[in-house]
Image (spheres, rainbow, N blue to C red):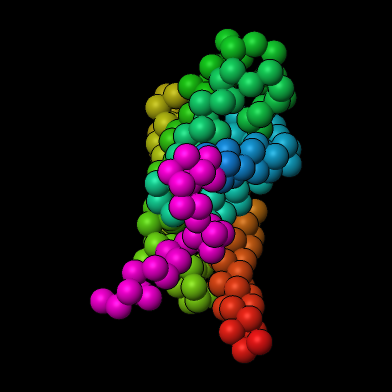
C-alpha cells in the first residue's frame, strides 16, 4: 500500500486540513460533530404533521445521510447521538415537535416516546452510511444512491418497530399498523431526500477532484 493511498481522504470532511496538534484535531472533530447535529435540528424544523400518525414529515433524514457521508461512521453516528441527547435539554425547539423546549420533561417525552425508534435509527443509519462512505461508496452515483437507500431503510426499520411497540399495534397486519403510520406516508419525501444526498456526495468529490487538478497544474 502506497503512502499516498494511506493519506488519501476517506470522507469529505477529511478534505479539511487536519491540524497537527492533538487539541486542535479534537476541537475540529467536535466542531464537525456539533455542526451536523445542528444541521439535523435545523432540518427538523422543516416539518408538517399528518392527522393520522404521530410521526411528522420532516427534513431530518437528509441531515442524517449527509452527516454519515460527510463525517464517516464514528463521527457521523456521534453527531446523531448528540442531536438526540441535546434535544432532551435544549431550551428551544430542537426536535420536529412543537411542544419541545418547554422543559426537560417535554424533551424527555419526545426523546423516549413513540418516535424514539427513529432517533435510534438516525444514529445507526449515519454510522452505516459513514462506513460505506469510508469504503468509497459515496464517490459515484451508482454506489452513493444505494448507500443512502440503506441508511434510509435502517431509519425506517428502527422507527417502525418501536412505533409498533409503543402504540401496541401490529407491524404490518390489520387496518392500523406501524408501516401504515410510520413508513408508507413518507416514502416519496424520503426518496427525494436520499436522491439529493446520494447526488450531492459524488458531486462534491468531483468538484474537489477538479479543484485539486487545477491547483496541481498551476
Q: Can residue 142 be seen at all in this image of the molecule?
A: yes
At 48% from the left and 29% from the top, the residue drawn is: 116
- Residue stretch in magenta: 1-29
Q: Quadrant of residue 66?
A: bottom right
- Residue 15 higher or lower than 58, as above or below: below
Q: Quadrant of the C terminus?
A: bottom right
The front one of 71 and 113 is 71
Q: Quadrant of the N terminus?
A: bottom left
The front one of 42 and 215 is 215
| Percent x, y of residue 208 | 60, 73
The front one of 16 and 102 is 16
At 66% from the left and 29% from the top, the residue drawn is: 94
| Percent x, y of residue 112 | 48, 22
- Residue 52 higher or lower than 16, as above or below: above
The front one of 189 and 102 is 102
- Residue 185 higher or lower than 145, as above or below: above
Q: Is residue 72 magenta?
A: no
Q: Can residue 58 be seen at all in this image of the molecule?
A: no
Amino acid at each position: 500500500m502506497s503512502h499516498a493511498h494511506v493519506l488519501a481522504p476517506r470522507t469529505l470532511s477529511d478534505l479539511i486540513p487536519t491540524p497537527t496538534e492533538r487539541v486542535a484535531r479534537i476541537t475540529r472533530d467536535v466542531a464537525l460533530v456539533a455542526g451536523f447535529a445542528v444541521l439535523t435540528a435545523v432540518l427538523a424544523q422543516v416539518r408538517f404533521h399528518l392527522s393520522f400518525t404521530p410521526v411528522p414529515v420532516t427534513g431530518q433524514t437528509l441531515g442524517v445521510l449527509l452527516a454519515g457521508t460527510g463525517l464517516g461512521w464514528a463521527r457521523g453516528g456521534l453527531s446523531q447521538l448528540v442531536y438526540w441527547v441535546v434535544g432532551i435539554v435544549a431550551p428551544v425547539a430542537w426536535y420536529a415537535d412543537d411542544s419541545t423546549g418547554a422543559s426537560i420533561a417535554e424533551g424527555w417525552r419526545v426523546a423516549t416516546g413513540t418516535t424514539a425508534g427513529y432517533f435510534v435509527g438516525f444514529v445507526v443509519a449515519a454510522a452505516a452510511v459513514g462506513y460505506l462512505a469510508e469504503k468509497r461508496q459515496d464517490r459515484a452515483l451508482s454506489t452513493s444512491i444505494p448507500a443512502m437507500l440503506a441508511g434510509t431503510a435502517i431509519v425506517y426499520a428502527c422507527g417502525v418497530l418501536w412505533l409498533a411497540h409503543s402504540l401496541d399495534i401490529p407491524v404490518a397486519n390489520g387496518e392500523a399498523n406501524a408501516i401504515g403510520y410510520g413508513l408508507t406516508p413518507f416514502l416519496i419525501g424520503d426518496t427525494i431526500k436520499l436522491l439529493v444526498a446520494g447526488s450531492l456526495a459524488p458531486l462534491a468529490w468531483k468538484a474537489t477532484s477538479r479543484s485539486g487538478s487545477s491547483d496541481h497544474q498551476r
